[in-house]
Amino acid sequence: MSNGDDDPADASEGADAADDGGDAGESTETAAPTLPEDPTEESLTEYLDEIADRLDDAETEADLDDVNALLDDAETGIEEADLPEPDGDDEDDPRGDLEARVAEIRDGVEDARGPYGEDVVEAIETAAGTVEDTEWTEDGHDDVAAAVASFVDAAAETVDADAGPDGDGIADLVAALDAVAEAVADAHLDADADADGIAALLDAIDELAAELDDAEEWDDLETHEQLRARGYYDVLGHYKDFPVEWAALKEHEAQGNVDMILLALDSLGSEFMERHCLEAFERMGKRGKTEASVEEVLGRVEKRDRPAIRILGKMAAAEATDTLVEYVDEDSNPQLQKAAFKSLGEVGAAEAVQPLANQLDPDGDTEDLVRPHAARALGLIGDARAVDPLADALETDPSDDVRAAAGWALRQIGTREALEVAAEYADEHSFVVSTEGEKARDALDDEAEPAATA
């Protein structure tokens, strides 16, 4: 590599040798351009033109490294050159134009590099991801298996790869591609010495990618074709209701086919079918609870969807407790709060006792119409830790509805302490409160009768 310290005499000797024709059969290498001693805009432009020509002639990584070194010299020259600076509205910016030219040539250097063995590995990993993440039809799966086997055979001509996949399963196909990628990485292919091998591998990968693109995916089918292929309509002896998707949904609900309801929910984009799928889950309750269905409904709950919150309660999905508790303090959205309270009660979420008890405070932000739902949720949970806050609500809350709900909740908890607290209000002036007190007193009397008989 030549730079500003090169001896001009060396260049002269090279020129003389070229004039003399040199030794027969020997090629002469063009001397590297030299940075001008007192660089100007014109001389720097010529210098960059020569570097660009050298880039066009570059054949190896070392040649490209030399071009980058010359560009380093060019940047130094531009920085040190006495160039006019742009003034006001003057759009001429020689220094900026020269720096932009350097950046452009550097981009050309990077574009000219490689390809490398790492590029081959990355392309194989991309293809493996496509094979693994795509949902193929039966015909598409067969085409993918054939394409992977063909690629492995082609790759074996360049690197030490296995003869083919161990089977036709997706995991087998992905494992075969991973093995080829590992073999390529272990081969430490050189961009210059192994250029032909790298090119052959990339051609094989391009062929694999094209065949994967042509293979049939489920997404290529119309929605009704997908549903028919997966047996969604098989539950129907004949099409009775319209639309037929709804008729099939009713049968799947009756038979407890959760996967088919999820399939309809995912495939059918109409609001009509979405509503009926969610209503089916709500009616099914615990029968509709699977890991997949809870995950689907939870995704909707995170978007503050009240019907989805109700469904989690009906499913008694304890794994949804943390998400539901997040909505307990949603004082700005009472309807959302009420749905969350009830679902937490139906789930029996002991973790929610304290957050729900906090909502009983009449001096807090919770509305009078919401506090009874917090009390009832505590009753559904049935945790004895709620007795004291419910007793406080029964004694001090200004709303008879809240007090009656607290009495009801104490009866649901059902411990002797809880029943005795509620029974104290059997003669309360408020009918709704006294009714709960009388029922609690009756429950205590029922407990005492066997002992008296004995």
Image (cartoon, rainbow, N blue to C red):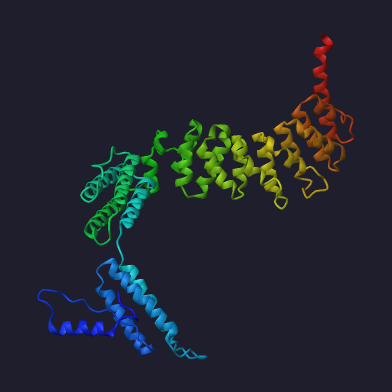
Q: Nearer the viewer, residue 241 or 377?
A: 377
Res 81 → quadrant: bottom left
Query: Residue drawn 80% across and 40% down?
Result: 402
Farthest residue toward the top? 454
Query: Residue drawn 33% across and 42% down?
Result: 175
* Callout count: 0
Res 425 → quadrant: top right
Viewer can see residue 373: no
Query: Residue drawn 82% across and 45% down?
Result: 362
Q: Nearer the viewer, residue 54 or 100?
A: 54
For residue 13, side relative to residue 44 (left or right): left
Q: Quadrant of the N terminus?
A: bottom left
Res 38 → quadrant: bottom left
Vertical side of 240 occupied by 330: above or below: below
Task: Residue 348: give x, y in percent of width and height.
Answer: 67, 33
Task: Residue 415: give x, y in percent of width and height.
Answer: 78, 25
